[in-house]
Image: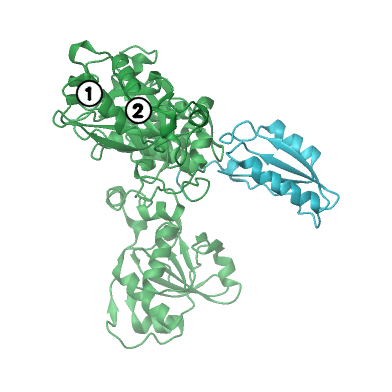
Amino acid sequence: MRYVSPYDPGARTPVTPAPRPDALAGRTVALLDISKNRGAEFLDRVERNLRDRGAAVERFAKPLFSRPAAGELIERIAARADVAVEGLAD
Amino acid sequence: MPPVADMPAPGFTLPSTTGAPVGLSELLAGGPAVVMFVTDDCPTCELTLRRLGAVGADVTVVCEAPPAAASRLAARTGFGGRMLSEPAPYDTSRAYGLDAVPTTIAIAPGGVVAGTVVGWDAAALSALVGLDLGPEPPARKPGCAAKSTYDAAQLAADGGTGDDDPEAMFELGWTDGLPTIAPTPERVAAMLAGRDPAASLGPVAPGMGEATLERVAACAVLAGCRPGHFPIVEAAVRAMLEPAFNLHGQAVTTQPAGQIAVVNGPIRRSAGLNAGMGALGPGARANATIGRALRLVVALTGEGMPGRLDRSTLGQPGKVGTCLAEDEERSPWPPLHTERGLDADQSAVTLLAGDAPLSISEHRSRTPEELAAALGWAAATLWAPNWWPIGAATLFVICPEHADTLAVGGWSKDDVRRAIWEAVQRPAGELRHGEFTARVANAPDAELVPKWDAPGDILLVVAGGEAGRFSAVFGPCVGMDWIPITQEVRCDT
């Protein structure tokens, strides 16, 4: 096709998620609070449920919900946890 | 002349409408093949495709049109067989020496022509494809000129390259729902006017596609901009990509906010922007297309397409594009860009994040105090009725008659801002309903809370027709940590 594309093909490469673990017991789950209103309440409940299932939990937070997580934060989560859960709320 | 029996059939590889490219050698791998050349706007070709489709004839069609147009031809004729696309410059058609379409050619496995039929000839075609195409009239019908025979003037009359069909843009998804102009290399080059196509303005949130000038120009072409509009589009994209504007938050939010461009300076006139009657549209190409180009950069290059990464609950019609110009000549006050540090003879675009405009009718106020209060109270429910302060810059568009009333006695823009800010304040205790801010939650009941943190959060521009006392206010995008950004529009890059 002889059009000039408005898209950046480099930006369209999908990211492959890490393989899903078969169980959570004995694994570390990162809970990321994006700093939306009442997000912490939601994640508190998730944390209790995860601990009941034998998972270790580490909490992380973004300073502001409307901006993407910093690369450093993502790397820290990846280094310390097997699974990550992001909590959106309002 | 098309090839006749015993002549070699020229080889070709052409894109199929359903997938991968298809070559002649592949067609001949399983035995003899029948190849039929058609165009997408020839009644005889349509007749032939309908009749061949009705009997399920094993014919490979080469359509002198882009894939999208070829697909539509197949759909409207009910032809379910293999359809290949040959857009301009029609090299394959030319290699086959076509004069007219349809031209149907039987080719033996060795690549030698076994027979040729030009036009619709029921008996001859039945023999060629080995199926009875039925007795329905007509028995014969001449076809149309093959596009490969067109001269430059005919090609131009045909839409230049045949790539201009807005349907093709819809099929690619390069649209905001309205028809777009195909970004052909020629049009994009004209838009760039010598700028470096590879130069980048930065990644566009949320998908972080790189906004090369070439892609921005492609969006400007799609939007319908003229090259004279491009300096404004470029400056607006620069402003939009400033980190302090936080496009990411705006682009993915469930809020309805879009990006609002306010143009100041001499380029308003040369670009043909309308700052007068109907200044917020519709009607003026420059206003409509510049705002639209900006939004297409977000939706396409930035991947922020509504319903995909753009998660807006409702959206709003201004999100197709909002670009306005200040009527500096009619305004009693200095223009917006000079308040933001530029000189009056510079051109500039100021970008804000906001919703559709809310119209404010006010025909009774005769003093600046009364009118400022009316404008301010009309804006008091923006975002949410009890969300005070709103916490984001808010743009008022003041119509000329209102501007005259506000400027009586020499009021400056700052005076108007302060009057609006002072007028719209309520005791915290009255605001504790539904959704309210932490400031309202924590303040003593009697403490007055203003709708805006400070008068400086109120932006004023003058625009609109001479008659009528209708101003407008754009509800801002809230909670997204953005500030208005002003960029100079430079025409010499």
Coordinates of residue B128 in the picture (x, y in percent): 43, 80
In the image, the chain rendered in green is B
Badge 1 element: helix
Q: Are marks 2 and 1 on the same chain?
A: yes
> Image height check: is B463 above or below A53?
above
Asked which quadrant contains residue A64, the reply is top right
Asked which quadrant contains residue B230, the reply is top left
Q: Nearer the viewer, residue B484 or A17?
A: B484
Task: Locate the N terminus of chain B and report the quarter of the image it occupies.
Answer: bottom left
**For mark 1, does the 10 Å Cα neighbourhood hold few (<14), some (14 to 19), or many (20 or more) residues?**
some
Residue designated by label 2: B395
Amino acid type of the residue tagged 2 in the rendering? Leu
Q: Residue at x 42, y 36 (%)?
A: B386
**For mark 2, does the 10 Å Cα neighbourhood hold few (<14), some (14 to 19), or many (20 or more) residues?**
many
Q: Nearer the viewer, residue A4 or B391?
A: B391
Viewer-side label of 2, 1: 1
Q: Chain of mark 2?
A: B
Coordinates of residue B448 in the picture (x, y in percent): 41, 24
Q: CA distance from mark 2 to mark 1?
A: 19 Å
Q: Residue at x 42, y 34 (%)?
A: B431
Q: Nearer the viewer, residue B38 or B28?
A: B38
Q: Chain of mark 1?
A: B
Q: Is residue B114 left or right of residue B395?
A: right
Badge 2 element: strand
> Image height check: is B99 above or below B50?
above
Amino acid type of the residue tagged 1 in the rendering? Glu
> Image height check: is A4 above or below B87?
above
Q: Residue at x 41, y 29 (%)?
A: B352
Residue designated by label 1: B370
In the image, the chain rendered in cyan is A
- Residue farthest toward the left in the current orientation of the protein: B467
